[in-house]
Amino acid sequence: MNILIEIFATIALLAFVILTIYAMISLKNLVALMNDSRNSLIQITSDMNQLKDKLIISLDSVNSATKQIESTVTHLESHADTILGAFDPFIKLTDIVYDKIAPPVTTVATIVSAASKAVSAFVNVLSKK
């Protein structure tokens, strides 16, 4: 019976040694995985910092361009108001001239139309006889 216990103890000790070796290999792989993860995180952090710096530069450029566009639009608005102000007297003059000329022209057009109809009617009456 002693031999049986010694065999079981030896098998148990051997199984413990094998499990310990397996645990050591697993821990070694885990340490390598952790190191790879740490290196990847360092690289990601570095990339994110570079991206942040480039985004800040880009946003500064966009901000500067926006200010320039705003300044240009303001400048154009002031010049457009000046140009439109210069045309106001011509528009008023055109309205006054139209108000003066339109009624006589309309009257003449009506008279010409009536005379044309009269001549046409007269020619029709003469041509029937």
Image (cartoon, rainbow, N blue to C red):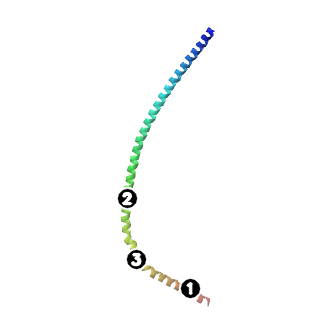
What is the secondary structure assignment of the residue under circle 2? Answer: helix
Give whichever of discs 1 and 3 has the lower sequence position. Answer: 3
Q: Is residue 75 above or below residue 35?
A: below
Whole-percent x and y of residue 101? 43, 79
Q: Pointer 2: residues within 10 angstroms few (<14), some, or many (20+)?
A: few
Amino acid on which disc 1 is placed = Ser
Please name whichever residue, 47 or 26, is drawn nearer the observer in this view of the structure.
Answer: 26
Residue at coordinates 63% horizontally, 9% vertically from top-left?
1
Amino acid on which disc 3 is placed = Ile
Give whichever of discs 1 and 2 has the lower sequence position. Answer: 2
What is the secondary structure assignment of the residue under circle 1? Answer: helix
User: Foreground mark, 1 or 2?
Assistant: 2
Whole-percent x and y of residue 41? 46, 33
Q: How far apart are marks 3 and 2 (CA)?
A: 33 Å
> CB of mark 1 within 8 Å of CB of mark 3?
no
Q: Is residue 48 above or below residue 12?
A: below
Q: In this view, does 119 lie above or below 25?
A: below
Amino acid on which disc 2 is placed = Thr
Q: In this view, does 68 lie to the left or right of 5?
A: left
Q: Is residue 45 left or right of residue 18?
A: left
Label 1: which residue? 120
Residue at coordinates 49% horizontally, 82% vertically from top-left?
109
User: Foreground mark, 1 or 3?
Assistant: 3
Q: Pointer 1: residues within 10 angstroms few (<14), some, or many (20+)?
A: few
Q: Distance between the residues labelled 1 and 2?
A: 63 Å
Please name whichever residue, 28 or 2, is drawn nearer the observer in this view of the structure.
Answer: 2
Label 3: which residue? 96
Check residue 74 in the rendering and tell me which mark sits there, or answer none.
2
Check residue 68 in the rendering and tell me which mark sits there, or answer none.
none
